[in-house]
Image (cartoon, helix red, strand yellow):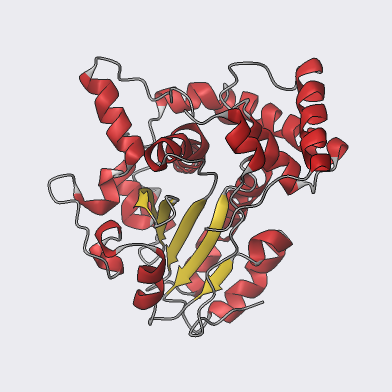
């Protein structure tokens, strides 16, 4: 795994950034966004270490976190547990998105299936507002629970996830249904959870995807586009080069079935779920993470910025 050390100038910028955002009360100790160097570095990297732009980005993020859902992200997360809410199975029938174990570098794997997408049918059972809230808490769980737990399990800082999007059965009619929602999802990911995706693997891309990509590409930052690998149906070897078969769901060519845990889709399997179960055994059912368990100096000097794994059989649409 490639690592990148901060330069002396970047370290100095980080210290100035930390002082400014605390002095101006943009961020306070105990904020659920995180107050460690890894969190601050995500915003600095997203704005190329421009102090004013990074500060503005963090300020906008904090404002969003205070107001989303009407009463803020913390209240929303407490009332809508991303791993256990009544509408979860119904939503997953249409658009499943879930974290499932980790790849060989310890990065959590985030999987999404779009083939069953049918929003008119879904909204007979779930309100659009509740669906959006489910998307939001799923995104927030990455930095709140998933990455800290993955870091502890790996014994090193883990700052990014691997995303696998399966488009089998997905076509233009479904894209028009989900276009606005998908754009909004990309926006919150880039604006409020920056630099958390290490690689995006799109598999089973249909023939119409070139047309669809023409709409999606302008939504994405240049740095995000560079992390995208677009594959057709011959994706199995590519995925297994990134994720061990034992950690990859059987439906994607791996060996994992999460038998007895509701299947891979509903299990939430990974270090984050192990920690949840451990807290429950000790009588603490809170969804709050207990801290990264990684030394600040480690995070400040080592950040994951691996580019996408490039394979000869990939078709890159740029």
**296 or 90, nearer to the observer:** 296
Residue furthest left in the image: 260
Residue 76 screen position, x and y as percent = 49, 26
Whether residue 220 is visible here, answered yes or no, is no
Residue 277 screen position, x and y as percent = 25, 29
Residue 145 screen position, x and y as percent = 44, 33
Residue at (53%, 49%) from the top-left corner?
Answer: 160
Residue at (47%, 58%) from the top-left corner?
Answer: 163
Look at the image and tell me in which quarter the C terminus lies: bottom right
**175 or 281, nearer to the observer:** 281
| Depicted 275 relative to depicted 282: above or below | below
Whether residue 252 is visible here, answered yes or no, is yes
Count of numbered labels shown in the rendering: 0
Left or right side of 47 for 83: left
| Depicted 72 relative to depicted 225: above or below | above
| Depicted 32 relative to depicted 309: above or below | above
Residue at (40%, 43%) from the top-left corner?
Answer: 154
**123 or 214, nearer to the observer:** 214
Residue 33 screen position, x and y as percent = 59, 28
| Depicted 181 relative to depicted 216: above or below | above
Which picture quadrant has residue 58? Answer: top right
Left or right side of 1 for 127: left
């Amino acid at each position: 795994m490639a690592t990148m050390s901060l330069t002396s100038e970047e370290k100095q910028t980080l210290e100035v950034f930390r002082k400014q955002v605390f002095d101006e009360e943009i961020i306070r100790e105990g904020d659920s966004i995180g107050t460690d160097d890894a969190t601050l570095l995500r915003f600095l990297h997203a704005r190329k270490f421009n102090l004013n732009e990074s500060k503005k980005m963090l300020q906008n993020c904090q404002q969003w976190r205070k107001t989303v859902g009407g009463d803020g992200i913390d209240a929303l997360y407490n009332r809508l547990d991303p791993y256990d809410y009544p509408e979860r199975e119904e939503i997953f029938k249409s658009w499943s998105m879930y974290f499932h174990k980790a790849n060989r570098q310890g990065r959590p794997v985030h999987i999404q299936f779009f083939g069953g997408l049918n929003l008119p049918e879904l909204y007979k059972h779930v309100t659009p507002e509740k669906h959006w809230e489910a998307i939001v808490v799923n995104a927030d769980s990455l930095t709140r629970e998933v990455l800290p737990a993955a870091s502890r399990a790996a014994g090193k800082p883990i700052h990014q996830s691997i995303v696998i999007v399966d488009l089998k059965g997905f076509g233009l009619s479904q894209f028009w249904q989900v276009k606005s929602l998908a754009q909004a999802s990309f926006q919150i990911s880039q604006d409020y959870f920056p630099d958390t995706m290490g690689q995006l693997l799109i598999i089973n891309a249909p023939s119409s995807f070139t047309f669809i990509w023409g709409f999606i590409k302008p939504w994405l930052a240049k740095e995000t586009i560079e992390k995208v690998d677009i594959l057709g149906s011959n994706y199995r070897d590519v995925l297994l080069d990134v994720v061990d078969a034992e950690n990859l769901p059987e439906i994607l060519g791996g060996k994992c079935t999460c038998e007895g845990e509701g299947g891979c889709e509903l299990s939430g399997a990974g270090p984050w779920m192990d920690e949840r179960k451990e807290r429950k055994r000790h009588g603490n059912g809170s969804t709050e993470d207990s801290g990264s368990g990684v030394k600040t100096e480690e995070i400040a000097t080592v950040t994951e910025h691996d580019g996408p794994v490039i394979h000869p059989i990939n078709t890159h649409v740029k």
